[in-house]
Every structure is written in structure tokens, then in C-alpha cells.
Amino acid sequence: MQKVEHIGIAVSDLDAANALYERLLGVAPYKEEVVAHEGVRTSFFRVGPTKVELLEATHSQSPIARFIDRRGEGIHHIAFEVTDIRAEMARLRAEGFQLLSEVPRQGADNKLVCFVHPKSAGGVLIELCQSIEPESA
């Protein structure tokens, strides 16, 4: 793993959270997007070499909605950048970690992602993310 890529924070109201974090961090979010298959609307703030991702559920059955129902708003996950997500997934499986998917999925901010179950990672949801190279025009 190369570095902490971002910290994900579950929020009930993305617009209100964006305003709060803009005041807190002194910068506006550089990107907002919807990841429909995850049921989430996100925004990203740059904080030095790391990012903060705010996550709002787009429907009541999304993982973020369930998280907020159980735990309230707050830190949802820590994401680590990797250069080869498939190799890292294989390494973690061999080490006994439980992954939440068999293959990486398309995530926000032009990344392939995979999550490590918190039950096998000391109670913390870990996200692996690998940048997807933009296709040449």
C-alpha cells in the first residue's frame, strides 16, 4: 500500500456537509459525483496529499444509509492507494482478510475499489483503490 488516499465520512445531507467542510478546510470540494450502483452521492476535498470524501446515501437501502442508521454520521472508511489492486486483494485473502467482493469495482473519483470487511480489519472498513488510467483520445 502506497499511502492513505482518502478518508470517507458518512453524512446525512451532502450540501450541508459540503458547506461545513468548506468552512473547516478553507477550500471548496473539487468534485461531486453519484455512484449509482453503490447508492451514494459523493464530494471530495483535497487536504495536502490526502483527500476527504463525503458520502450521502441516495436511497434508504444503500450501505451509507444503513451505516448512518446503525452508527450515525462520521468516519465510514479509510482508503489506501495501491498500484495493483488485484495483487493486493490476493495478498490480503492469503493473509486471512475477508474482502467484500471477489473482483474490484468501479468507484468514485476514477478508481477501481475493493473493501476489506471491518470484522477482519480490527473494526475498520478499509478500502483499496487503484487509479484508472484515462484512455488516450
Image (cartoon, grey):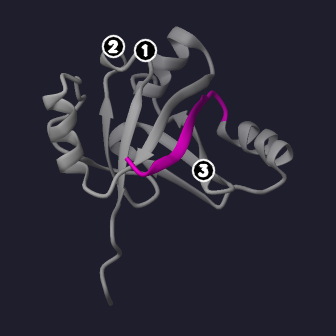
What residue type is disc 2 on?
Lys
| For the residues bearing labels 2 and 3, Cβ distance under 8 angstroms | no
Q: Disc 1 or 3, which lies upstream in sequence?
A: 3
Q: Are marks 1 and 2 in contact (CB under 8 Å)?
A: yes
Q: Toward the viewer: 69 or 80? A: 80
User: Where residue 15 sits: x, y (%)?
Assistant: 71, 42
Establish if 127 lies above or below 65.
Answer: below
The residue pinned by badge 2 equals: 119
| Furthest residue in direction top, as rendered | 70
Residue 105 x/y as whole percent? 26, 47
Q: Which residue is mark 3?
A: 51
Residue toward you, 89 or 58: 89
Which residues fall within the magenta stretch? Answer: 1-13
Q: Amino acid at mark 3?
A: Lys
Circle 3 packing at 10 Å, graded few (<14), some (14-19), many (20+), is some
Total of numbered circles in the picture? Answer: 3
Amino acid type assigned to the residue bearing label 1 in the image: Gly
Work out whether 104 lies above or below 84: above
Which mark identifies residue 123? 1
Q: Is residue 127 magenta?
A: no
